[in-house]
Image: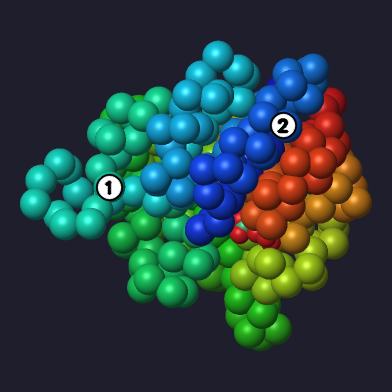
Amino acid sequence: MRGKLVVGNWKMNGNMLQNQQLLDAIVPEIKTLGNMASAVCVPYPYLVMTQKVLQSTKIAWGAQNVSPYDLGAYTGEVAAEMLVDLGCYYVIVGHSERRALFGEDNQTVALKFKKAQSVGLIPILCVGETLAQREVGETERVIAEQLDTVVNLVSIDAFAKAVIAYEPVWAIGTGKTASPDQAQHVHAFIRNRLASHNAELASKIQILYGGSVKSNNAANLFSMPDIDGGLIGGASLIASEFISICKAAQC
Ligand code: PGA
């Protein structure tokens, strides 16, 4: 049975004081929850403080990006080895903001996925279509290409230690959520595509939904058969929202 997972993606938000307050508020509440797992993916400079606050809790932490390169002369990059050093469990790869704003193509995302796994991190691979792509019926083609590039580089077996996040670009930060049925349709497509390589593995992989998940829509989304939790942006910055979403994930 797949457990539910809720991951906060803080994006480029926060400061020491706000982060401390947010973490202090969520830790005691999440401690009381059963049958679900949670994590926060924070900006690099706050990984140290996050590790300090979360290390004896059941909330995991991770980063939002990683270099595809090994340690060396790559000014401004952050190596996967460094994330391990800071106790990270997860790292987000291929978020649509990185694809759209920082020119990350499918191949770069696949290389980051591979590098993250090579040091034992669990990549959270983001896939999703833009509104224009959805409107011309290209959703499945786009997502298949995003997935297949990674499968071709690392092989299907690598997905045994990965999480996928379906994030329709048109739903991110817009307040427009995919309906549970729309999301379920794409989640089932993703699972079936992986199942065509390895059915057992596909039945076990967690596929999160991301895109304007809030406390008032989380339960409906999480009740769908192929939605195994959420990747939460804006609402993960508000303690009460994040806690409610985690509660909605308890099965
Ligand atoms: P959102 O972001 O919840 O603010 O829409 C989700 C994400 O980008 O991961």
Decide which of 178, 18 is in the foreground and name it.
Answer: 18
Residue kind at label 1, given as amino acid type: Val
Q: Which residue is mark 1?
A: 78
Instruction: Pick the quarter of the image with the C terminus.
Output: top right
Q: Does residue 183 appear anywhere in the picture?
A: yes
Query: Quick one: SS at disc 2?
Result: helix
- Return the x and y of residue 249 as percentages of the image width and height: 80, 34
Q: Gap in Å between the C-alphas at discs 1 and 2?
A: 27 Å
Q: Is mark 2 within 8 Å of ligand 1?
A: no
Decide which of 146, 39 is in the foreground and name it.
Answer: 39
Residue kind at label 2, given as amino acid type: Ile
- Return the x and y of residue 76 as percentages of the image width and height: 23, 57
Q: Is residue 76 left or right of residue 231?
A: left
Q: Residue at x 15, y 55 (%)?
A: 74
Of the numbered discs 1 and 2, the one sitting upstream in the chain is 2
Considering only vertical position in the picture, is 103 above or below 12?
Answer: below
Q: Which residue is mark 2?
A: 26
The extreme front residue here reads 17
- Return the x and y of residue 114 as percentages of the image width and height: 31, 43
Considering only vertical position in the picture, is 96 above or below 73?
Answer: below
**For the residue carrying disc 2, how many other residues have a C-alpha within 10 Å: few (<14), some (14-19), or many (20+)?**
some
Query: Quick one: SS at disc 1?
Result: loop
- Return the x and y of residue 10 as percentages of the image width and height: 58, 50
Please give the count of numbered marks on the rendered protein: 2
